[in-house]
Amino acid sequence: MPATDLVDLLRLYAVTGIADWRLAPAELKKRARECLGNSLAENEAEATVTIYTPFNDANASKLKFIPMPKHPQGGSPERSFFLPVMRKSDTGQYLANFELFLLVAAKNCLAFRFEASHPESVHNYGHLQLSKILLKKTIQVPQLLEWLPVVYPAFPLSTSDPLRMFLAMTTAVHGYSTGMLDVFRDMFQKASRARDSIPYVEELRQMLK
């Protein structure tokens, strides 16, 4: 899957999440802001900057957690947010790791990192870890529990491909058959691009076989 397709997918997904976030209760928005502070994207412009800005120390303050679509409705966590940590390869392609922030209830939070293989490291495989300091340690959320283990466990994802890591993260939040399949259908239909969802649906089907 070309990197430009990944960026396009992230943009469409973010537009759907922002639209749902506009309808969120004011009290929920207040709690999310108290947890994430200035690191919360609340409009399409902030989400777009996050998606297109490769991470480095100078750019860190531009990157914000993007609200994810509220699907399914109800249940726990109350709301989920994601942050693509973009970078460019030596050939100029966009690559990404992902951070997932969950506002579970009240101001009780959890966070996870979906990371590609770290060459020359014991974590030289795509993996999922808990997190307590976000975005390469530039975002601190007081509500994240200090005692959480953040090195192990590092659950294998069986991939370092950024699209598949994104699909793993979103399927964890939304589910599959009445989850991500519905999210794909809705977001591409709203963009008048229903057929463009087909390769992503097939990629997810192959991934979960």
Image (cartoon, rainbow, N blue to C red):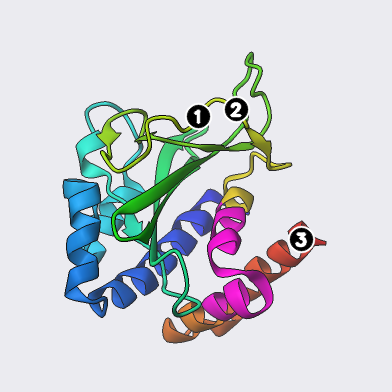
The numbered mark, 1 or 3, whose residue comes first in the sequence reads 1
Q: Main secondary structure of the magenta part?
A: helix
- Of the 4 image quadrants, the one containing the C terminus is bottom right
Q: CA distance from mark 3 to mark 2?
A: 24 Å
Q: Nearer the viewer, residue 150 or 3?
A: 150
- The residue positioned 53% from the left and 76% from the top of the image is 183
What stretch of residues is rendered in magenta?
166-184
Locate residue 150 relative to residue 56 in the image: left or right: right
Q: CA distance from mark 2 to mark 1?
A: 6 Å
Locate residue 3 relative to residue 70 in the image: left or right: right
Quick one: SS at disc 2? loop
The numbered dot on residue 150 is 1
Quick one: SS at disc 1? loop
Quick one: SS at disc 3? helix
Q: Look at mark 2 in the image and give the residue it sits on.
A: 152
Q: Residues within 10 Å of mark 1 (few under 14, many from 20)?
A: some
Q: Residues within 10 Å of mark 3 (few under 14, many from 20)?
A: few
- Quarter of the image for residue 46 reads bottom left
Q: Picture coordinates of residue 62 (x, y %)?
A: 22, 43
- Of the 4 image quadrants, the one containing the N terminus is bottom right
Disc 1 marks a residue whose amino acid type is: Val
Q: Look at mark 3 in the image and give the residue it sits on.
A: 208
Locate residue 196 relative to residue 139 in the image: left or right: right
Q: Can residue 176 be found in the magenta stretch?
A: yes
